[in-house]
Amino acid sequence: MTEPAEPTATPVMKPLHPSQAEMPFGLMYGKAITKLPDDLYIPPDALEVFLEAFEGPLDLLLYLIKRQNLDILDIPVSTITTQYMEYVELMKAMNFELAAEYLVMAAMLGEIKSRMLLPRQKDDEEDEEHDPRAELIRRLQEYERFKQAAEDIDELPRLERDIFPAEAKRPEFTREKAQPDVDMRELLLALKEVMHRADMFESHQVSREKLSTRERMANVLDKLKGRDFVPFVELFNPEEGRLGVVVTFLATLELVKGSLIELVQNGPFAPIHVKAKTLVLEESDVLAQLELEDEPDDGVDDETDAHDGTKG
């Protein structure tokens, strides 16, 4: 005997895309409302849309005249007055707050209409200035000119409405020019030139005061204060002779060694300039950073004769 086959379960088809829940109209006592009540009555005039918007009574009159393609110089006062009053009553029914000028214009139209109905005398028929509509026509023409001018101005391109200034800024590119290293040969040639200039001065001093390298370092820093680049040759005073030039040169080398100044040369055989690397410091603070090796405190003495023996 064969056993009966077991019933197979029918697979449940799931939707391919999840469905979004219906959004409620609103909440009432914390409960979402997604369906309108069956006994809800909405009157046919529950929603009324009033598209025309006027800046004043003259704007309303001009709108009524242009809508019917009427000549502004020959206004049918009776028809325009009737339409004007219909709009005023409509705005009252819409609970619009009417300005007093609308009512003043209504009274003015009523006066013109009544004066138009009165019989005229023969003398008044030939005189155009006695036309009751003259003042109203003048005001309408003046208002039309101002309104047209305002529309022309509004059509001009306006900043932040039609034209927007560009806010993007191009990146700033800085190009750093690498300073060439100063060759020792160039430095020695500059020293030779200074020594040659010092030889041109003849010294007649009997005795020479002691020159201190540390003091000369402070003098060099004083010359560099407040200046970006100082020519190398300006650090030397040829009148001091060879000894003064040597002491100044040694002081300059010590300052370069202590990373307090740097020597800059724009190209081969170009003049050498000196630039201070530190901020403006007191002499005592600067000298405290220096580590002089094998430098006597009493300075450099001239062990030669009283005269420096320079060439005249």
Image: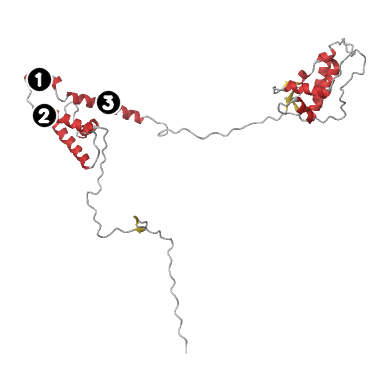
Q: Position of residue 212 (x, y in %)?
A: 84, 22
Image quadrant assignment for residue 271: top right
Residue type, numbered disc 3: Arg
Closer to the chain start, of discs 3 and 1, is 1
Q: Residue at x 83, y 23 (%)?
A: 213
Question: How far apart in space, not on screen, are marks 1 and 2 (Cα)?
Answer: 16 Å
- Amino acid residing under circle 1: Asp
Q: Amino acid at mark 2?
A: Ser
Residue on which disc 3 sits = 145
> Left or right of 150: which side holds 11?
right
Mark 2 sits on what residue? 114
Residue at the spot of label 1:
124
| SS class, disc 1 | helix
**Gap between marks 3 and 2, in whole Å?**
28 Å
Q: Is residue 271 visible?
A: no
Q: Secondary structure at mark 3?
A: helix
**Callout 1: few (<14), some (14-19), or many (20+) C-alpha neighbours within 10 Å?**
few
Quadrant containing the C terminus in the rendered view: top right
Report the mark closest to the observer, 1 or 2: 2
Residue at 25% across, 57% down: 40
Marks 1 and 2, the one that precedes in the sequence: 2
